[in-house]
Amino acid sequence: MLELVPITESIGTDVRGVDVTAGLSDSDFERVYRAWLDTTILLVRGQDMTPAQHIEFTRRFGEIYTYTRSQFNDQEYPEILILSNKKENGKPIGSAYSGRVWHSDGHFLADPPVGSMLYAREVPPVGGDTWYGNMYAAYDALPERVKERIEDLRVVISRVQSRPYNYPDRPAPTPEERAEWADVSHPVVRVHEETGRKALMVGGNVPWRIEGMPEEESLPLVTFLQEFAVQPRFTYRHTWQPGDILLWDNRSAMHRATYYDHVAHTRLMHRTTITGRRTTAAAA
Ligand code: OGA
Ligand code: MN
């Protein structure tokens, strides 16, 4: 029987008593979907899914976004992105250094993905945890005067600038990529399209600039917000076991990967991504 158990006081729902490959009834799914929106991440442990079943389960939450130019899509199922340090015939089969800073996925895109579903296949004995933060809770906890100050602000994000930080293992952006990757801006306070709630969205390793604000004013503000957002009271650090599924709402959660010994151990994760929607600001 389906059971929904909070992971911590501030974030996440542990979904128990289900086999996702058997399919959830509409009424059970409705409860699970609601918990996802309300608590920002869902954990389902002990699942044995094929890539096709992973895709099917993801589709219940929304349309799948396929990275069209990734060399790390699964050969047979391009909807699945592989995160791994493993190599086959000397070639990496997956992205090895994804997400080692607090971020939301695809924040350098005009329409960032709605969510991502990560499924653990092989995990190291220690390390390689993923950290999640509830950005509704972070926003709610801000002092009123800070809320007022940031209400209408937008943050400018440069994909070109962030590339060497996000992917130290990949070559620098080509001239074509530089031309294609226009800067985007997103509201610092994002209004969730489905819940109407406000979430603080200030992830990233490059100190993003606030639109129209001088750097000496912008930098301390962004740094303050980034540090405020990821205090332990808003976060949960997940230690993976094979068979764990974690689905995050990219509109209300941030996340980050952590270090593991990639020489001694292997990690193999499959990720699906749900298509993006335009971000909405509080002022809109
Ligand atoms: C991601 C990501 C973190 C991890 O898949 O978007 O940031 O721990 N992954 O693999
Ligand atoms: Mn990520």
Image (cartoon, rainbow, N blue to C red):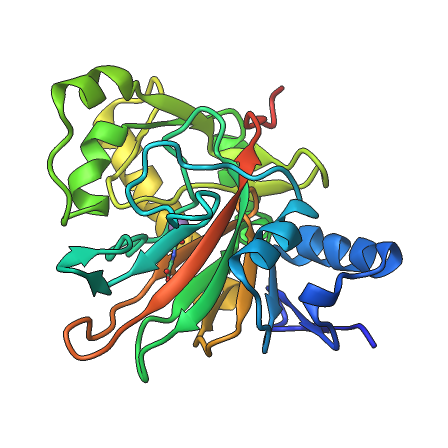
* Identity of the residue drawn at 32% across and 33% down: 69
Q: Is residue 283 visible from the viewing direction of this image? A: yes
Residue at x 73%, y 72% (from the top left corner)? 18
| Location of residue 82 in the rendering, given as x and y in whole percent from the top left corner | 36, 54
Name the outermost residue toward the bottom.
125
> Number of labelled discs?
0
In the image, taking residue 157 as reference, residue 178 lies left or right, namely left
Horizontal placement of 125 versus 40: left or right? left
- Left or right: residue 174 versus residue 128 is left
Residue 230 visible somewhere in the drawing: no
Which residue is situated farthest in the right direction here?
27
The part of the image, by quadrant, that contains residue 104 is top left
Which one is nearer the viewer's eye here, 245 or 259?
245
The quadrant of the image that shows the N terminus is bottom right
Residue 225, x across and y down, in percent: 40, 46
Q: Residue 63: x percent and y percent?
A: 62, 37
Looking at the image, is 123 positioned above or below residue 181?
below
Q: Quadrant of the C terminus?
A: top right
